């Protein structure tokens, strides 16, 4: 049987969502590990005043593509951007481009989606469901299509505890989308991704389909280099906020499995699934739960520990406070720490900003942070069990060489090392901070520690003074404690003089 790279040789690949986090890693890996691939057609929209060509050229200049650039400086010749706005009728692809795509595309990777948890339902449906339906219709017109790979999420069925590699009945009949009475999901994202799976499954008699369900996608593990990450989504924003000393408490279950999956693992599995689907043409859509919890579990409590110690070793610049965050599943305890460790320092800092003639901002930052954290807590407070038989089956189908090149064996993942690289990745690639500034960042943390000691001492003295001034009993206790200390001191001094 052909190896994965041999299969992709000479193939025309269509990718949606190529400018996104996972799309970029997919494009990079295809170009690097399948150098004979013919053309990558990327459906891209103009955005923020940039044309689609400008966006794609900028993307290819990014550090992520350094290794590909080294291997083949002309790699951009294989990339053809196609203008498309997925929320428009017929995906807003010009008739000439439709003609071109239908005559040559061999495999489709559909990554585009809105992944915001607070997306208005109408827009989430438009992009995650209706655009998927339209892409499937386009796929059916393609004369040489061999596989359609849809990227879903492991949380599409998060209303269940145990999740098999099957498509469950939709939360509502997709045809009656806009009259949905209630979501029965924590957000519009998971709801619309569940609907999209049904829409995809319904075409599986006409197309060869694979559905990839990653859990919480994090920084790269190994490829193209460890720790690559470019956004604040999911845990990345939480890690950064904790590393900056802003986030000190969050509601999460220490003992619940943190089902993080490195982005390169997801992409390797996706490419392998594309190969398998095209070569074996399974009769029904195969679903691949792409998760770590059942294979190499790691828990939120352990993540907290490793994130904190990593940011103490490699601090972020200009931290607000020393990184020291705790997670708790207790609602009241969390509320207490929110008050003491978030709101109180924010108030004091905003007061300082006001007094120094600057605009207060900390309370606003905390309000946004609490909104974001509130949306994530559903996922960090409980666990799920995913069946990953198809992932294992796929691994068993790969040659030893492909198993190395397209490695998705998460049993080999060393979590502490991964988390360390992840935290360093957020520093280098999300915040664009230089590693050479670490000594200055450490110095800043020492300054913060001294400020805290001074503040705490002054606060203690102030409280005690107020207390002593008002209560005879407090004064008596104070004199008693002080005289006891003196007695102990003179006892130890006397006994040490005797022994000498
Ligand atoms: C106590 C700490 C210990 C650490 C250990 C414990 C860690 C527990 C972590 C738990 C994490 C659990 C995560 C579970 C997620 C599972 C989900 C299922 C997986 C998936 O299938 S999809 C991927 C997940 N999707 C997301 O994560 C999207 C969630 N985000 C949103 O929905 C919105 O961004 C949000 C949160 C509603 C905020 O919206 P809004 O206020 O409108 O802000 P913007 O998104 O427009 O962003 C504006 C601007 O701010 C930047 N930004 C965003 N977040 C942060 C941040 N945390 N810190 C700093 N800056 C941030 C953002 O990039 C934008 O910048 P621009 O320059 O682009 O304007
Ligand atoms: N990140 C995660 O933790 C997880 C992600 N997934 C799934 O993986 C896939 C990729 O996610 P991820 O890369 O993180 O998401 P990103 O938000 O980083 O990327 C989304 C992509 O979709 C494109 N897109 C959005 N709206 C449109 C539109 N109207 N027209 C054309 N393109 C559009 C974006 O293009 P543009 O640059 O123009 O905005 C971007 O390329 C999604 O299907 C998601 O559901 C699943 C599990 C976890």
Image: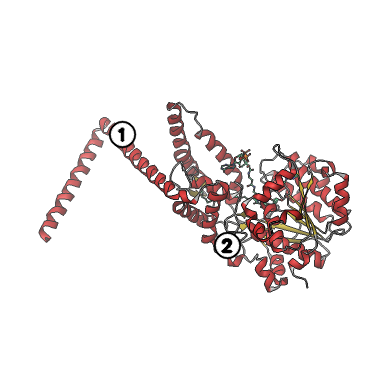
Residue lying at 17% horizontally and 50% vertically, measured from the top left: 489
First-in-chain label (2 vs 1): 2
Residue 45, image quadrant = top right
- 138 displayed left or right of 56: right
Q: Is residue 125 above or below residue 291?
A: above
- Residue 447 visible in the current orientation: yes
- Which is more toward the observer, 356 or 127? 356
- 240 displayed left or right of 1: left
- 112 displayed left or right of 140: left
Its colouring scheme is secondary structure
Task: Give the SS element for disc 2.
Answer: loop
**Does mark 1's beta carbon lie closer than 8 Å to ligand 1?**
no
Residue 414, image quadrant = bottom right
Location of residue 369 in the rendering, given as x and y in whole percent from the top left corner: 55, 40
Query: Splitting the image into four quadrants, where does ligand 1 fall?
Result: top right
Quadrant where the N terminus lies? bottom right
For disc 2, the marked residue is 297
Mark on residue 362? none
Q: Residues within 10 Å of mark 1 (few under 14, many from 20)?
A: few
Residue lying at 74% horizontally and 47% vertically, measured from the top left: 192
Location of residue 255 in the rendering, given as x and y in whole percent from the top left corner: 53, 57
Label 2 to label 1, Cα distance in Å? 48 Å
Task: Give the SS element for disc 1.
Answer: helix
For disc 1, the marked residue is 462
Location of residue 500 in the rendering, given as x and y in whole percent from the top left corner: 11, 60
Q: Is residue 169 above or below residue 475?
A: below
- Which is more toward the observer, 176 or 93? 93
Residue lying at 42% horizontally and 26% vertically, measured from the top left: 355
- Residue 183 visible in the current orientation: no
């Amino acid at each position: 049987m052909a190896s994965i790279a041999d299969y992709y040789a000479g193939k025309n690949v269509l990718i949606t969502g190529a400018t996104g986090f996972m799309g970029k890693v997919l494009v990079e890996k295809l170009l690097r590990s399948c150098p004979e691939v013919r053309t990558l057609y990327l459906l891209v929209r103009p955005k923020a005043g940039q044309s689609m060509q400008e966006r794609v050229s900028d993307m290819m200049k990014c550090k992520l593509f350094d290794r590909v650039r080294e291997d083949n400086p002309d790699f951009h010749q294989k990339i053809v951007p196609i203008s498309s706005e997925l929320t428009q009728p017929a995906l807003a692809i010009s008739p000439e481009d439709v003609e071109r795509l239908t005559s040559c595309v061999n495999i489709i990777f559909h990554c585009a989606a809105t992944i915001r948890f607070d997306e208005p339902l109408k827009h989430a449906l438009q992009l995650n469901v209706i655009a998927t339906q339209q892409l499937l219709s386009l796929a059916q017109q393609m004369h040489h299509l061999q596989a359609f790979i849809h990227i879903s999420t492991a949380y599409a069925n998060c209303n269940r505890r145990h999740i098999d590699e099957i498509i469950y009945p939709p939360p509502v009949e997709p045809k009656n989308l806009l009259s949905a009475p209630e979501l029965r999901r924590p957000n519009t994202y998971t709801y619309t991704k569940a609907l999209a799976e049904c829409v995809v499954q319904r075409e599986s008699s006409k197309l060869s389909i694979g559905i990839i369900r990653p859990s919480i996608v994090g920084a790269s593990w190994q490829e193209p280099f460890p720790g690559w990450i470019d956004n604040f989504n999911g845990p990345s924003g939480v890690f950064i906020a904790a590393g900056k000393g802003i986030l000190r408490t969050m509601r999460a279950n220490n003992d619940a499995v943190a089902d993080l999956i490195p982005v390169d693992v997801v992409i390797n599995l996706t490419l392998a699934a594309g190969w398998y689907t095209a070569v074996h043409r399974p009769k029904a859509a195969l679903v691949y739960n792409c998760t770590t919890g059942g294979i190499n579990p790691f828990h939120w409590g352990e993540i907290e520990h490793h994130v904190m110690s990593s940011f103490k070793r490699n601090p972020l610049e200009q931290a607000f406070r020393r990184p020291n965050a705790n997670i708790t599943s207790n609602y009241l305890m969390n509320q207490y720490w929110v008050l003491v460790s978030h709101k109180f320092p924010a108030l004091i800092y905003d007061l300082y900003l006001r007094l120094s003639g600057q605009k207060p901002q900390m309370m606003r930052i905390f309000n946004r942070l609490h909104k974001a954290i509130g949306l994530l807590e559903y996922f960090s407070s409980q666990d799920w069990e995913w069946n990953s038989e198809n992932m294992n089956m796929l691994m068993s189908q790969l040659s030893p060489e492909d198993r190395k090149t397209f490695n998705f064996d998460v049993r080999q993942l060393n979590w502490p090392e991964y988390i360390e690289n992840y935290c360093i990745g957020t520093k280098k690639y999300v915040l664009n901070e230089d590693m050479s500034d670490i000594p200055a960042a450490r110095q800043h943390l020492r300054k913060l520690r001294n400020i805290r000691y001074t503040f705490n001492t002054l606060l203690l003295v102030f409280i005690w003074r107020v207390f002593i001034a008002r209560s005879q009993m407090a004064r008596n206790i104070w004199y008693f404690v002080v005289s006891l200390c003196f007695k102990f001191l003179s006892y130890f001094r006397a006994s040490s003089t005797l022994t000498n």
